[in-house]
């Protein structure tokens, strides 16, 4: 992970927000290459989920909506995570990410160990337990540690579990609910009547606009409404770089279907497969993508089913894309709270109903991180180590670099600049004339540029051909400019 974060910083993909003031936890800025990669991810999603489908339309809703939206959706009362404070260190943890275990020797509990959720937490806890047994000079067999989240601790155990910050027991509070919505005030008066929220998901904008889309959009069930936009959550423990942040972007789609019992399991499965195939189509290595089916007893009360597509990040297997069958909970709630009908008249069945919905919801930033981790490789070319990002050409921030072999031959430079201008009309391209040619190739490999085009003496003096170099194979071929453009187009647009 450190290598990926280092590369992001060094080559201008992602920076900590407000770095010059020491940074602000959970917020990030995207630099020149990051902004291109992010845009390419969003464009690819929009093209494939909206433009290339007959049954999906888009919306772009405001970030701040009427506060009643969030009462109806259940976010005001229920959108919270359990939080635990360490009174001594003033550190704050998510109680479901803080794990503990009693340390038992020969049936006697000699103390407790704790660890924060992490791929290595089992080992960390086992080492701490062995250390405790040694320090207390206890004889006999140490029982294996069995970690449980702090949310499952018995109140009598709170005082005994050590704080991860101090390593000592006695300073952790019981878990308390912490609402994740950011509050703000609308207008000049700052009282309860002016309280509003930064949206914690884009989905509710879609539900709130359902009536308008049906009345104006010529849509027929089954159909989807898609939205890409910022969401804000005051996460207790933002972590793992951009994986869990406080300001992020979502790509959400609400796919409305009839309430027929047999409809939702079929459409739910179709969307799981579609999303999984889409991840492969943008270049994620399939062996890193998995499925996690939520057990029935862990589902939210309104949810019929939820399957996460997971990704094997360097810090563990984590949720990337949630695909939920939400029944008709949201539209029913908005009908109740707004007093406006959310019923849909189905012409083909000559009946009215509140549609059910399948919701694939994914974070742009989580895909961004998965794309980087999947593409990152270190290999050796001609005995020299290189770092390469094997982005699919569709997502690559720069599609091609134009490199004059030398920078002090005016005819050669002029020719390379002309080719660069020609390409610039079609793709984001980069011109680089400084340094040895091998080093220039490495610089492009490191930012994932799929093609380099080199203009050399033969180009201007002999054959009019340029050298096209492939990032992944490092193979070089001499081709006409037209052929080079055709190859780049085919790789980027799949034409
Ligand atoms: N409308 C449903 C919804 O918002 P969610 O599981 O809370 O469901 C959906 O969020 C997706 O949004 C997640 O699968 C993840 O990709 C992304 N996401 C959620 N919280 C995030 C955070 N704090 N930082 C980055 N991405 C986040």
Image: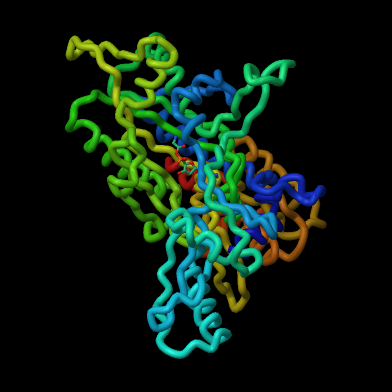
Where 476 sits versus 134, above or below? above
Quarter in which the C terminus is drawn: top left
Estimate the x, y position of residue 161 in percent, counting from the top left.
54, 65
Query: Can residue 22 be seen?
Result: yes
The residue lying at 42 percent from left, 29 percent from top is 50
Between 6 and 278, which is closer to the camera in this rendering?
6
Q: Residue at x 33, y 36 (%)?
A: 301
* Residue 480 makes an appearance in the image: no
Q: Is residue 273 above or below residue 134?
A: above
Looking at this view, is 128 or 304 the one in front?
128
Q: Where is 197 relative to 407, above or below?
A: above
Q: Nearer the viewer, residue 227 or 79?
A: 79
Q: Position of residue 154 (x, y in %)?
A: 44, 58
Name the residue: 18% across, 10% down.
Answer: 350
What is the x, y in percent for residue 484?
A: 54, 48
Instruction: Give the image's coloring scheme.
Output: rainbow
Indicate the quadrant where residue 389 lies.
bottom right
- Image position of 26 (left or right of 83): right
Name the quarter where the N terminus is drawn.
bottom right
Q: Nearer the viewer, residue 88 or 367?
A: 88
Instruction: List x then y, in percent, for residue 202.
Output: 50, 30
- Which residue is located at x 44 percent, y 59 percent? 317
Can you tell which quarter of the image residue 331 is in?
top left
């Amino acid at each position: 992970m450190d290598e990926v974060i280092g590369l992001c910083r060094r080559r201008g993909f992602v920076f900590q927000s407000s770095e010059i003031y020491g940074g602000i936890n959970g917020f990030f800025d995207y630099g020149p290459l990051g902004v291109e990669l992010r845009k390419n991810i969003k464009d690819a999603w929009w093209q494939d989920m909206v433009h290339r489908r007959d049954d999906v339309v888009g919306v772009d809703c405001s970030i701040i909506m009427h506060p009643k939206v969030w009462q109806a959706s259940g976010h005001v009362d229920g959108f919270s995570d359990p939080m635990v404070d360490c009174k001594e260190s003033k550190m704050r943890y998510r109680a479901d990410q803080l794990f503990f275990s009693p340390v038992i020797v020969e049936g006697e509990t000699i103390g407790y160990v704790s660890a924060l959720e992490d791929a290595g937490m089992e080992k960390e806890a086992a080492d701490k337990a062995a250390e405790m047994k040694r320090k207390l000079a206890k004889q006999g067999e140490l029982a294996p540690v069995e970690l449980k989240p702090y949310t499952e601790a018995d109140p009598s155990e709170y005082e005994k579990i050590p704080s991860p910050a101090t390593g000592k027991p006695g300073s952790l509070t019981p878990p308390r609910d912490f609402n994740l919505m950011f509050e703000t005030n609308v207008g000049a008066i700052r009282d309860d009547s002016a309280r509003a929220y930064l949206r914690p998901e884009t989905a509710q904008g879609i539900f709130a606009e359902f009536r308008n889309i049906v009345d104006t959009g010529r849509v027929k069930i089954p159909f989807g409404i898609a939205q890409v936009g910022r969401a804000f959550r005051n996460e207790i423990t933002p972590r793992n770089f951009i994986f869990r942040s406080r300001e992020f972007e979502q790509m959400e789609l609400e796919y409305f279907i009839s309430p027929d019992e047999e409809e939702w399991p079929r459409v739910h499965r179709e969307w799981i497969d579609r999303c999984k195939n889409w991840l492969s189509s943008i270049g994620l290595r399939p062996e890193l993508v998995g499925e996690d089916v939520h057990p029935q007893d862990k589902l939210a009360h309104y949810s019929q089913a939820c399957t996460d597509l997971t990704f094997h990040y360097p810090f563990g297997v984590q949720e990337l894309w949630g695909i939920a069958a939400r029944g008709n909970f949201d539209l029913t709630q908005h009908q109740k709270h707004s007093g406006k009908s959310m019923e849909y008249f189905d012409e083909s069945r000559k009946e009215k109903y509140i549609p059910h919905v399948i919701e694939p919801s994914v974070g742009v930033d989580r895909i961004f991180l998965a794309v980087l981790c999947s593409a990152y490789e270190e290999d050796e070319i001609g005995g020299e180590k290189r770092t390469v990002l094997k982005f699919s050409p569709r997502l690559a921030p720069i599609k091609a670099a134009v490199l004059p072999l030398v920078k002090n031959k005016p005819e050669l430079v002029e020719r390379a600049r002309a080719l660069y201008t020609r390409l610039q009309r079609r793709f984001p391209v980069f011109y680089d004339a400084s340094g040895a040619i091998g080093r220039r190739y490495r610089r492009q490999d490191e930012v994932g540029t799929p093609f380099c085009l080199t203009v050399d003496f033969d180009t201007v003096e002999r054959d009019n051909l340029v050298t096209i170099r492939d990032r992944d194979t490092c193979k070089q071929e001499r081709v006409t400019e037209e052929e080079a453009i055709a190859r780049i187009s085919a790789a980027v647009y799949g034409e």
